[in-house]
Image (cartoon, rainbow, N blue to C red):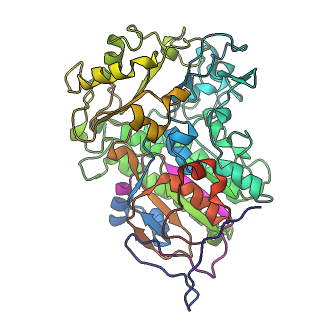
Amino acid sequence: MKRYLLPLTIVATGVLSACGGGSGDSSVLLSSAPAVAHVLLISVDGLHEQDVAHCIAAKICPSIAALAQTGVNYTNASTPGLSDSFPGLAALVTGGSPKTTGLFYDVSYDRTLYAPSDTACAGVQGWNVVFDETVGIDSVNGGARIHLDGGGTFNPQAIPHAKVNGNCMPVFPHDYIQTNTVFEVVKANLAGARTAWADKHAWGYDWLNGPSGKGVDDLARTEINSVDAATGTEYTDKFAHTEKFDDMHVQAILNQIDGMNSTGTSAAAVPTVFGTNFQTLSVAQKATNASGGGYTDATFTPGVQVSASIAYVDTAIGKVIAELSAKNLLTSTLFVLTAKHGQSPADHSTLVKNGDTLTALVQSSGYLDAAGNWGQNATATGSLNDGTGLSGTGIIQTDDLGLIWLKDQRQVAAAVATLNANLGCTAPGICANGAGASILSGAALTAKFGDPASGRTPDIIVQPNPGVIYTSSKSKDAEHGGNAPDDSHVALIVSKPSIIAQTNTAMVMTTQVAPTILTSLKLDPNLLNSVKLEGTSVLPGLSF
């Protein structure tokens, strides 16, 4: 078993040297403290650093404040270039960016893959991969998601194929990720280790298992886009309903702390690495400003929905802390509170919803089918993963950014020229003419995200002006996915009772969480492929 130990600087009192503020990387754990036996990772979708600062200052989040009082609060943490849920969570559990994980979005494209129906890999290559709520078998033929567990197994119409050593093989989500995860490393290198996770999609998050397919012992099968029989609506219809979904994950964590599996139906060892993701805050942030969603000003003053959601999250965290304490696990548990992504824009006055002008321009200019007949945009039922759709077409995925996979990669230069000729905010303009906007392609894109010629990386990535959402939706006023400041600047607190409170202002990335988790367990962080390939360092200010 490989182990990795950071050098310890022990002073006469037995306390590791510490700093009460600033951005240095002084050690802040007591040498006499119990070793880290468990790591609990809580991700709160949409949780900005400013949310934490505001609620602590206002004394309305006592549980989060308690974590900060025995932890390092990183006030300058960012996601790795893209802030959708897939790359955001992958950063936390692999230590890598999309360049090495291959996860750009839950809706993406791979030029090397074949359609789910092409079991011989004999047809056209290039498939629009969708690993979202439709990956459960309930969604076969566009069916309704009537079960919390998505139907209990994979939807075969969602699983593309690839040629592997001459054989045509299915590509499940765990096959799609291109690097290993902390769950796999911990299980392979710590005798008796157990791992667990709970997230928003029952089957799309199978990639957390990593390429082995076996990284997570207890992966909760809960689908947020399933229909709640009690209301007849999905759990995302309003934040108060989303709380009911998140409550299931809180209970899963409590069950695991109590020595049971996530459902509480059988005994199980307390996981070595476990955690969950909360959705309530994200739903409140996306809700329209007129209905009390989002923020009331540019300084992240929460509206009524966001304020209530932060209170909910804080109460949930309080329950978890109390249970760890009750089971005498608090002193041996490293608690990491962060977010996959933020939400943009916080300042409602910057919001621009001109419709999806980016897709319209790309289509009308001949880089994708003019009528929108590409990828899973062209399914028979109008639902994703219904077994139809078109291969080899390229696709475009937009939210508050645009990922473009061209049908013909020889047109990259022409497509970029077209985009640059239409940067304004008046149609057909794509509203990318201000500070913070960019159009990434060629060598610069390859350096940051990998070579599009390999098949997975987009040909062009468009970051519009901060505040722009490529939609005309009247139901939401915020989104995520891109690299606008509100998307990427997230909360990050690493806490343990033996840590001396510290505010660390150094620029850090959420990718640094994964190697820090392994280091806390005395494992070599370079056992993570992405850490080794990208040179990801542990978070500063901690020693184990």
| Magenta residue check for 100 | no
| Magenta residue check for 40 | yes
**Camera-side residue: 411 or 343?**
411
Task: Point out the image quarter for the C terminus.
Answer: bottom right
**Camera-side residue: 379 or 18?**
18
The residue positioned 74% from the left and 53% from the top of the image is 187
The residue positioned 36% from the left and 11% from the top of the image is 366
Q: Is residue 380 left or right of residue 308?
A: right
In the image, residue 485 sits, relative to residue 512, either above or below, namely above
User: Could you tell me if residue 398 is visible in this image?
Assistant: yes
> Farthest bottom residue?
12
Q: Position of residue 250 (x, y in %)?
A: 59, 51
The residue positioned 29% from the left and 46% from the top of the image is 295
**Camera-side residue: 62 or 442?**
442
User: Could you tell me if residue 232 is visible in this image?
Assistant: no
Q: Which residues are magenta?
A: 26-51
The residue positioned 21% from the left and 27% from the top of the image is 425
Q: Is residue 423 left or right of residue 40?
A: left
Task: Point out the image quarter for the N terminus.
Answer: bottom right
**Camera-side residue: 40 or 262?**
40
Q: Position of residue 339 (x, y in %)?
A: 47, 50
Q: Position of residue 202 (x, y in %)?
A: 63, 35
Numbered marks: total: 0
Q: Position of residue 87 (x, y in %)?
A: 51, 41
Q: Chief secondary structure of the magenta span?
A: loop
Quadrant position of residue 355: top left
